[in-house]
Image: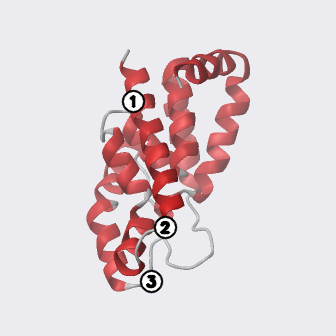
Amino acid sequence: MKETLDKAVKEIEQYREEIEKKLLEFARSDLLFFWGEKRDLYLKQKTEWQPIIDWIEESLKVKVNKTDKLDVPDNEEMQKPLKNVFDKMSNKELACYYAAALNMKSVLLALALVKGRIDAETAGKLSYLEELWQNEIWGSDDEAVKRRKERCEELALIESYLKK
């Protein structure tokens, strides 16, 4: 993973503008925008995700719109503040951010991880919140557990790399 992140830092140097554009596009459909219709899932999301959303809203001075439908909520006002955050990141921070965002399907969780608001273990748990909730009801699938474990290990490596 270290070699992958070293390579990513070099790519950031070369393709920073394109990578930032990809991240901004990815931010339009962030995982944390989509909330469950089931009451117990919603309450779990409110308990676990809402503090991150509150922090994002305060940090970026934006309102995060959420939905429990399939349509993507309008969070266009988040684009410029996110771009400003990216512009202030070092190549190393942006490379870690990019890797974490792809891993978790969330630029918001990645930002919280890179800025030290949450640790890798918490980030992994939050990114799989709905899947873990479903496991409580239906049980877990061995392949999904293995994949989740690998992704969480990657997040720990990203966090470690960032701190060096």
**Which numbered marker is on residue 133?**
none
Q: Nearer the viewer, residue 78 or 38?
A: 38
Residue at numbered disc 2? 141
Tell me if residue 17 can be seen: yes
Q: Residue at x 64, y 18 (%)?
A: 7
Q: Toward which corner of the image does residue 111 lie, by quadrant?
A: top left
Whichever of callouts 2 and 3 sits on the residue coming sooner in the sequence is 3
Give the foreground label among 2 and 3: 2
Q: Is residue 161 left or right of residue 11?
A: left
Tell me the kind of residue under disc 3.
Answer: Glu
Q: What quarter of the picture does the N terminus occupy?
A: top right
Residue at numbered disc 3? 37
Q: Secondary structure at mark 2?
A: loop
Give the foreground label among 1 and 3: 1
Q: Nearer the viewer, residue 18 or 144?
A: 144
- List x then y, in percent, for residue 46: 31, 68
**Other residues around mark 1 within 10 Å, as few (<14) / some (14–19) / many (≥20):** many
Q: CA distance from mark 2 to mark 3?
A: 23 Å
Q: Secondary structure at mark 1?
A: helix
- List x then y, in percent, for residue 132: 39, 66
- List x then y, in percent, for residue 94: 54, 27
Q: Secondary structure at mark 3?
A: loop
Q: Residue at x 47, y 36 (%)?
A: 154
Q: Would you place residue 88 above or below residue 34 in this image?
A: above
Residue at numbered disc 1? 159
Tell me the kind of residue under disc 1.
Answer: Glu
Whichever of callouts 1 and 3 sits on the residue coming sooner in the sequence is 3
Q: CA distance from mark 1 to mark 3?
A: 32 Å
- List x then y, in percent, for residue 76: 59, 55
Tell me the kind of residue under disc 2.
Answer: Asp
Residue closest to the far front: 142
